[in-house]
Image (cartoon, coloured by chain):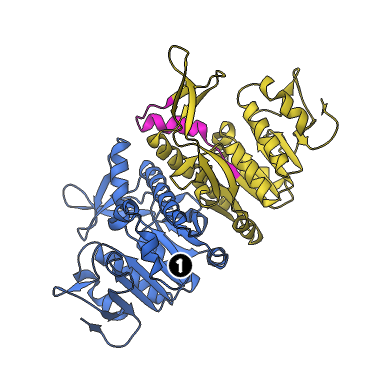
Chain colours: A yellow, B blue
């Protein structure tokens, strides 16, 4: 079984060009799809007339702050994307089942966030409505796959307090781990992990962990999710550009050699 | 198996009071939930700053016109409701799976609509993005129920041209018919079908068909969907107020006596 995470950076192109059925044609295995949708979120927040808030971590990383309204807009937009993906697959005769992640992904709300205030001093604020994934109800997903359907899962999680916004890369990693998938593909807008100007073909998970802080924003989160997936038992994580070749890019696994460029 | 349609009129109360788990406690059978959400739609259309359009049929019935933007807002709001229902059920330890209707409900887009223009003359306009349901992929729904989950289904359908807004009452009727459910419950904000000031306890489907045009707006659509469900093989349709007793209200079936008040 293969879990494919479709990143926000390529979602609009994939949907507009109706490219997904062709991309999946190259895969000869059962498939689960997990999607992001950050780019769409920006567009719809503007339409809603709701200004997104951003916070900066002590490490200097800027990220979206999920207050209650942002959470609502986030889940609505994710569901719209889900609908578009399912429609596109069904149009090619592929059975697809669009599932609210809140049904199957379990998370713990982050109580607090440490951020930098305007004076560049650390301060603690309420964690908002993002979560750290704790587990996945995998049996029902596997049953759906066995029924001949591709589950298409939105990155929203359940916690007792609220449904939560979660990172789609990590959602895909956990779903791959919990369903016992052999491979996690992170489909994105670059051909893989670049190192010294070249795409890394092959790297082991421990080595990847050691370089996470040295790669750019966006790729760092992908690598972190990739190593989580490996730790959860996934054999290979492929970071690839599906418009070139979804099965080839950077392959991360639990092998002993460090990295092959 | 019982299909429960939760109407827009009671959704807000059900969600705010977290009432659904208690309501379902009274039902001793497998359950499928289909939800509407018209009330929420009005609220969010306002937030989006998008003015809804309404059209009037030659029979004088006013209804929302689903253009492309309304369809988008509709599907987003339905998914948010779906999320809230699933969250509420999971909070009570009930396994629930939120499903995009577009995955399993098939419909045909209405090409044209006949409406009255300002001068009260009939005119033909593009049908917009509403659909007439043609079938339901029921095997996957039954598998999900067999897996111990309550499917929670949004009223959005698939057609080759687009996903479509569909009437939730009829979606519930078709899902009940295609899954072979014994009973369809239409949970709403009245205690059943009122006739001469009293709730009708029992009525047969043919009789109901004969009085559809004599009941008020809203109830007419429910009765139409109820008779469709009976025609599709459902044994009983119950129109009831879940805050009183979801299992009792007006029972419509294929019996021979006409109506019992």
Residue B45, given in percent of the width and then of the height, sits at 31, 41
A187 vs B110, left or right, is right
Tell me: residue A229, above or below residue A50: below
SS category of the residue bearing label 1: strand
Residue B12, given in percent of the width and then of the height, sits at 30, 52
Name the residue nearer the viewer: A66 or A155. A66
Name the residue nearer the viewer: B21 or B115. B21
Q: Is A44 within the magenta?
A: yes
In this view of the protein, can residue B34 be seen by the observer? yes
Name the residue nearer the viewer: A43 or A177. A177
Quadrant of the drawing holding the C terminus of chain A:
top right
Residue A75, given in percent of the width and then of the height, sits at 45, 41
In this view of the protein, can residue A242 be seen by the observer? no
- Residue drawn at 57 percent across, 19 percent down: A59
Q: Is A175 within the magenta?
A: no
Name the residue that disc number 1 marks. Answer: B31
- Residue drawn at 76 percent across, 17 percent down: A196
- Residue drawn at 52 percent across, 62 percent down: B149
Tell me: residue A207, above or below residue A75: above
Magenta region: A34-53
Output the chain of dot 1.
B
Name the residue nearer the viewer: A90 or B238. B238
């Amino acid at each position: 079984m293969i879990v494919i995470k479709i990143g926000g950076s390529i979602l609009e192109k994939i949907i507009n060009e109706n490219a997904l059925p062709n991309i999946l044609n190259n895969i000869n295995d059962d498939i689960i799809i997990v999607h992001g949708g950050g780019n769409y979120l920006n567009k719809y927040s503007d339409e809603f007339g709701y200004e997104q808030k951003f916070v900066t971590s002590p490490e200097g990383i800027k990220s979206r702050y999920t207050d209650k309204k942002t959470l609502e807009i986030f889940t609505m937009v994710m569901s719209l994307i889900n609908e578009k993906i399912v429609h596109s697959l069904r149009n090619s005769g592929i059975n697809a089942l669009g599932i609210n992640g809140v049904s199957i992904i379990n998370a713990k709300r982050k109580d607090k966030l440490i951020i930098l205030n305007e004076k560049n001093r650390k301060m603690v604020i309420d964690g908002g409505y993002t979560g750290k994934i704790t587990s996945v109800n995998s049996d029902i997903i596997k049953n759906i796959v066995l029924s001949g359907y591709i589950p298409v899962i939105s990155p929203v999680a359940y916690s007792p307090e609220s449904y939560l916004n979660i990172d789609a890369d990590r959602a895909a990693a956990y779903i791959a781990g919990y369903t016992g998938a052999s491979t996690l593909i992170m489909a994105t807008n670059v051909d893989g992990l670049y190192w010294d100007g070249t795409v890394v073909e092959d790297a082991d998970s421990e080595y990847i962990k050691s370089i996470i802080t040295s790669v750019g924003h966006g790729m760092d989160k992908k690598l972190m999710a990739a190593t989580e997936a490996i730790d959860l038992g996934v054999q290979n994580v492929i970071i690839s550009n599906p418009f070139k070749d979804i099965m080839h890019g950077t392959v991360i696994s639990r092998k002993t050699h460090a990295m092959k460029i």
